[in-house]
Image (cartoon, coloured by chain):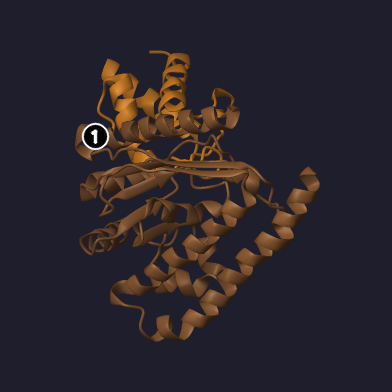
Chain colours: A orange, B brown
């Protein structure tokens, strides 16, 4: 899976489930400040992305280390690369 | 004529409503301060009476106030409504809920006038209270017959904003029915940042309760939030297009 595909799938899921306008989904957007997602949303987001990508994220996902969307894209890209090996 | 009505609404009924809030709090203060009742129950009953008074003033200001209720019991539940105006806090009394625990943003607790009532009634500061403690406070309140009221949009700034799923997660955890309530017209009557009370058509509608058990899976509360928002906003948008 390419980075572009990861970005597109992630943005699709966030836009659909959390009603976030696509233009707000910039890599530098912060979950709390820019996107207005709270701690419960963060937990829901993990489940939504697990369903979207068909892989387990929750054991490896550290909520505190994720500040921006770019952190999330990097994390999923790393997991996808590991899964391919 | 429109401006004249707005001036009359603001000067007469708006001042009347403020006077009612101030004087009733002042009169009730000594009693409620020393005898707030079990977990602030007496203060919450007092807020119900205050809300009924505010509804009377809303009726005077409105072109028409319509309340559509269901026959559902008024016991423990999670009431969720859209949020357009500061007046919305008082509208739940129109449905007959007289023992309501509000979960609100922290700034309301800092208002000098409201602080006493907010703390005395045991209302919950959503920004300061850790989730586990909030859950336990709500569980205890529900066991004492309280309805829990939240505005899942969290703010009045965007009337079409997303419904956050916290209220629905709470209902799921406590196994309480969700009672959706649509509020239409209060945003036109008293918009955010305005002090002028415009005459508008106000419609309050209570929907049938929804059991959290009808939503399964890890994302049940998120799906319920989306469905309840659709139900409420479809009604509000239809009313406001009239």
Image coords of residue B240 (percent x, y) = 58, 32
Q: Nearer the viewer, residue B215 or A56?
A: B215
Judging depth in this view, the residue of B226 and B36 nearest the camera is B36
Residue B102 in view: yes
> In the image, what residue occupies the spot 58% across and 43% down?
B64
**Number of numbered tags placed on the structure image:** 1
Q: Is residue B12 left or right of residue A15?
A: right
Q: Is residue B183 left or right of residue B8?
A: left
Q: Examine the rendered structure and indicate whether residue A13 appears above or below residue B52.
A: above
Give B174 or B43, whichever is nearer the viewer: B43
B206 vs A47: above or below: below
Within 10 angstroms of label 1, few (less than 14), some, or many (20 or more) residues?
Answer: few
Q: Is residue B225 above or below residue B95?
A: above
Residue placed under numbered mark 1 in the picture: B218
Q: Residue A5 is drawn in which quadrant?
A: top left
Task: Tell me the element at label 1.
Answer: loop
* Image coords of residue A65 (percent x, y): 41, 43
Q: Position of residue B3 (x, y in %)?
A: 79, 47
- Residue B157 visible in the shown view: no
Which quadrant of the structure image shows residue B140?
Answer: bottom left
What residue lies at 47% left-to-right and 31% top-to-bottom?
A: B235
Identify the residue shown where x is 71% and y is 57%.
B10
Asked if residue B17 is positioned above or below residue B22 in the image, the reply reads above
Q: Locate residue B177 relative to residue A29 in the image: left or right.
A: left
Q: Residue B123 placed where, x, y %?
A: 40, 65
- Residue B15 lies in quadrant: bottom right
Chain bearing mark 1: B
Quadrant (top left, top right, bottom left, bottom right) of the N terminus of chain B = top right
């Amino acid at each position: 899976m390419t980075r572009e595909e990861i970005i597109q799938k992630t943005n699709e899921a966030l836009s659909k489930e959390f009603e976030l306008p696509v233009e707000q989904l910039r890599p530098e957007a912060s979950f709390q400040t820019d996107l207005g997602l709270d701690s419960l949303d963060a937990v829901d987001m993990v489940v939504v992305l697990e369903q979207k990508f068909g892989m387990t994220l929750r054991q490896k996902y550290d909520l505190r280390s994720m500040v921006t969307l770019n952190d999330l894209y990097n994390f999923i890209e790393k997991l996808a690369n590991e899964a391919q090996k | 004529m429109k401006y004249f009505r707005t001036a009359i609404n603001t000067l007469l009924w708006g001042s009347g409503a403020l006077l009612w809030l101030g004087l009733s709090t002042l009169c009730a203060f000594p009693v409620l301060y020393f005898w707030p009742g079990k977990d602030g129950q007496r203060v919450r009953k007092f807020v119900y009476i205050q809300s009924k008074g505010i509804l009377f003033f809303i009726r005077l200001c409105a072109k028409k106030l319509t309340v559509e209720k269901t026959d559902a019991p008024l016991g423990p539940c999670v009431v969720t409504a859209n949020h357009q105006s500061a007046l919305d806090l008082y509208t739940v009394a129109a449905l007959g809920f007289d023992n309501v625990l509000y979960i609100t943003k922290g700034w309301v607790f800092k208002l000098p006038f409201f602080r006493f009532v907010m703390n005395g009634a045991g209302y919950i500061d959503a920004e300061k209270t850790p989730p586990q403690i909030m859950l336990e406070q709500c569980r205890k309140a529900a066991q004492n017959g309280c309805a829990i009221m939240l505005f899942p949009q969290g703010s009045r700034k965007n009337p079409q904003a997303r419904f956050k799923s916290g209220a629905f997660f709470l209902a799921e955890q406590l196994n309480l029915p969700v009672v959706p309530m649509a509020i239409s017209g209060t945003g036109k009557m008293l918009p955010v940042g305005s002090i002028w009370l415009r005459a508008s058509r106000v419609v309050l509608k209570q929907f049938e309760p929804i059991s959290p058990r009808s939503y399964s899976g890890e994302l049940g509360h998120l799906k319920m939030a989306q469905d309840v928002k659709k139900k409420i906003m479809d009604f509000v948008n239809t009313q406001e297009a009239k």
